[in-house]
Image (cartoon, grey):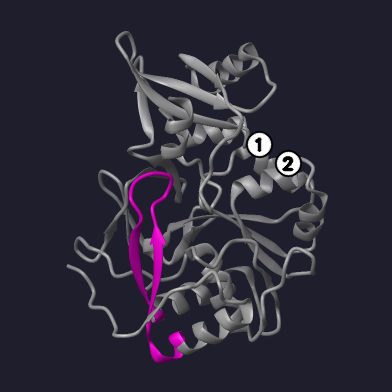
Amino acid sequence: MENQAKSGVFKYQHSWSITQTLENLVTALKDGWDISISTSGSSGKPKEILIPASAMIFSARNSNNYVGAKPGDRWSLLLSPEHAAGLNVLVRSIELGTTPVTVNETADFTAIVPTQLFRALNGDIKLLKHLQGCKAILVGGAAADEALLELANDNGLNCVTTYGMTETSGGCVYNGEPLPQVEIRINETIEIKGPMLARVELKDGFFVTQDAGRFENGKLIVLGRIDDVINSGGKKVSLSKVESALGEDFAAFESKNSEWGSALNIATTSRMSDEEIQLVLSVKFGVKALRIHRVPEIPRTALLKVDRLALDKLIS
């Protein structure tokens, strides 16, 4: 079953200024228009997701309540409004009666992806100082490595890990716990229910994700996308977790192998030696890469995820 769409549709345009975007978004939310967001993840053809205005507002209020945001508090916009994560910052700001600021200004709250957190902790001093001034930092879009989060904490950053997707109006699970009115169940994959769902196909009221997961001590542990996990020589390995462990200079991908079935391959711009890379893979995941490719760059999407289609062209 799929929800019925409203007549009006809001879609962000790159030519709009932030002021224009906010004005148009306020009108769309007030009039109950759907919010259109194109998404393709790291592979596949782009698809349009329609999110009811009420779902975006619900998601924004849930986020603001979780971090303790009050009217007058400011969010910084460090992600593009063409994606749910960036657009959510605008809706949260509208709810607080403020305008989002840039990395050059002081903010109370912000939202970033793990790659930005990595960069802040590895030389981007401006971004680090900006994050240190925030009361809370939402980190989502991909799994953040525990070592990275520990380093962030050591540097005075209050990171809140989030799990969600465009179909759930962005993050709906914070630090492993579903936000109010969000229901999570696990069958073959994680399934999600709540007022923040987009107009997507539902099963008994739940949106069925492509993510594997489990509950541990009452908290949701996301194991990764089922199409992101390869079985190499009997060992199941998540490509995204490998990338998270190695850092932003790396990309992991699969190739078929007559001996192992599926083989792990690594592409990198790093100066780390093959032996050092293999040691990390062996210690953390119990596997070794079939081949390590040295590439001029790691192609990424607008949300800084590895663009696997572009990577495949680069390698081949």
Q: Is residue 249 above or below residue 262?
A: below
Magenta region: which residues? 28-53
The quadrant holding residue 7 is bottom left
Question: Helix, strand, or loop for circle 2?
Answer: helix
Q: Are marks 1 and 2 in contact (CB under 8 Å)?
A: yes
Residue 158, label in figure:
none
The N terminus: image quadrant:
bottom left
Q: Residues within 10 Å of mark 1 (few under 14, many from 20)?
A: few
Which residue is at a point 42% across and 50% down the rendered structure image? 41
x and y percent of residue 236 in the render? 38, 25
Q: Residues within 10 Å of mark 2 (few under 14, many from 20)?
A: some
Task: Name the one closer to the observer, 44 or 207.
Answer: 44
Task: Name the one closer to the observer, 158 or 308.
Answer: 308
Which residue is at a point 32% across and 47% down the rendered structure image? 210
- Write down the residue under mark 1: 147
The C terminus: image quadrant:
top left
Q: Is residue 189 above or below residue 240?
A: below
Question: Label 1 sits on what residue type?
Answer: Ala
In magenta segment, residue 35: yes
Q: Is residue 235 above or below residue 56?
A: above
x and y percent of residue 258 in the render? 29, 10
